[in-house]
Each structure stands twice: as structure tokens, then as C-alpha cells.
Image: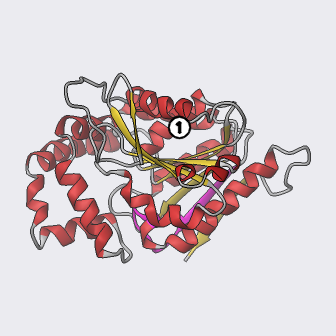
Amino acid sequence: MSYLTTPRCRLFYQDTAEGDPSQKEKPAVLFVNGWAISSRYWKPLVDRLSPAFRCITYDQSGTGRTVIEGLDPDFTIEGFADEAGRLIEHLGLTGSRNLHIVGHSMGGMVATELCIRYNDALLSATILACGIFEETAFTSLGLMFLGGLIDVSMNFRNIFLVEPLRSLFIKRAATGHIDKEYSDIIIEDFTTSNKEATNAVGKFSIDPDALREYTRSVIGIESPVLCCVGMADRTIPPEGTVTLFEKRKTLSKSPTRLLQFMSLGHLPMLEDTVHFAEELKKHFDFASQFYKKTPPTEPLAERVQIP
């Protein structure tokens, strides 16, 4: 575990190559966190993937062990991408096509921006539980209402430290079972995250202009993209990820795959680590083959459902 000093913050990160330098020869996977959570929730997945991949996690400014005291960072998609970009460059991951980027929830928006910036280094993108919606008066009203709920939840977030609200909060995030260690992490991260950062992230995640730009960027990713969603997600409507897949399938010439976990919620990496890791490996292997002289013969757009 290390710190990288940037103009925004002292960025805490973990790189499996620190303990095993031979991992620098393996494909790298950068994980981008969701809203108001540190990188600790990736650990079970990293443990599964690290024998074959160099895994890199980090705490975005405003969460976990990253320090922003005395600084005034820009809490926008571009600002969060700037700090992750500093990490990518610091670790020397821009020189060859050897990087997979995985973004969860609002981290999908940041991950997509990184995919566009580091196109020449990118092997694949995975967007998990970060969808879009057709713009109607109804959805606009719903997003406005959700923005108000974000303000309220941040002002009274300590109520989620006590039962029964604590359990209700976890059940909203995860439909399947997750270990107590990680439910404790989710609650702790949410209640201790930087309020200004968490408010800003919550609001740009539902901003119509930001969502339109996000859609254009996802369509513009030239590498293989995996859209993944738990169809029992109670945090973000899962239909949005399906819509994103359909948009990219129609408008992009690059491979796109939709992975639907029919009985999981917002945290597949914790609810079913084994199967989620297996599907990521398949996606990573497909992407590696895609860039070889003889590309794979699988369809450019595919939908997979897992019970």
C-alpha cells in the first residue's frame, strides 16, 4: 500500500505488483469505486484475480485513506479522472495496450472518461451498474427527486449506524448475502466520507448533461466493453445498464457484451465473487484475443444471463 501526492490529494492505492514484482509483466486491472465507498470492497475479487492479473485499487478523494486536507479538489467526473490518470501514469501503464479498467456505479462514469483518455493503453472496459435512461418528463422529475434525497441522506447519514436502518441500508445495496466484514465497511465508508465530495458525486451521477456525455463516451470506447448489472439492484434501476448496452450495440462497431445477474443487487463483486470473477476473466481473455492478428469469432454484441 502506498500514497501518491497529486495536486488534488495524497492518493492511497494498492498495487499487487508491490509485493510481487513479476506481476508487472501481467495485464493490469484498475478498479474505480462507486459512490461514498473506499477501495476495500474490491479485496475478495482482487484475491481471485491476482494470480493472473496485476490488480490496482485506490481510494478516490473524499473516501477512505486518501487525504485532501488543505486542498480544494474539483469533485467532477473530470477531476476524479485526473487523479486516477496520475496514478495510471505513475505506475507506467500508458506505454502499451495492457490495461483493463473496471468502473462500478458512479465509478463507471469516471472509468469511461479514463478509457477515452488512455485509449492506446486500453485492453477492455467493464461498466458495472452504471446505466442511462431515456429522457422523458417522468425520468427528469425522478432524477430531481433523487437529488433531493441525496441532500437529505447526507445530512442524516449517521442514522444508518443503528438498527434497523443499518440492515435496511445494506439490503438496499446487496440483494444477496455479503459477509459482515464488508457490510461494516460499506456503512463505515458511507458515514465517514467527505460530505462535499459525496454530495457532488451523487448529483453529477444523475445530471442529464453528464449522463448524455457519458453515453457518448461509452459508445466511443474502441476496445471491448462489458456492461454488467444485477437485475435485482435496488440502488440504481438495472434497466439503465440494459439501455446503455442497447445504445452501444446499435451505434458502436466495437464488441459489447451484456452480463445480467438475475438474482443479484448492486454489489455482484461481494454477492457472488466466484461467478463475477469468472465472467471478468472471460471478458479480459476475449479482449486480449481481440487485439491479436486473428481476432476471436464471437459475436460483436452478446447478452448473457446468469440465474
- Kindly give the residue lying farthest to the right in the view shown: 294
The percent position of residue 175, horizontal first and vertical second, equals 36, 72
Residue for point 36% across, 40% down: 60
The image quadrant where one finds the C terminus is: bottom right
Per the rendered image, the range of residues in magenta is 256-269
Q: Nearer the viewer, residue 178 or 165?
A: 178
The percent position of residue 287, horizontal first and vertical second, equals 73, 50
Type of colouring = secondary structure
Q: Nearer the viewer, residue 288 or 51?
A: 51
The reply, left or right, for residue 229 in relation to residue 106 is right
The percent position of residue 30, horizontal first and vertical second, equals 53, 46
Report the label total: 1
Q: Is residue 94 visible?
A: yes
Residue for point 55% across, 65% down: 260
Please name the amino acid that badge 1 sits on.
Thr
Residue tagged 1: 112
Residue for point 73% across, 41% down: 254
The reply, left or right, for residue 278 in relation to residue 187 is right
Q: Is residue 133 visible?
A: no
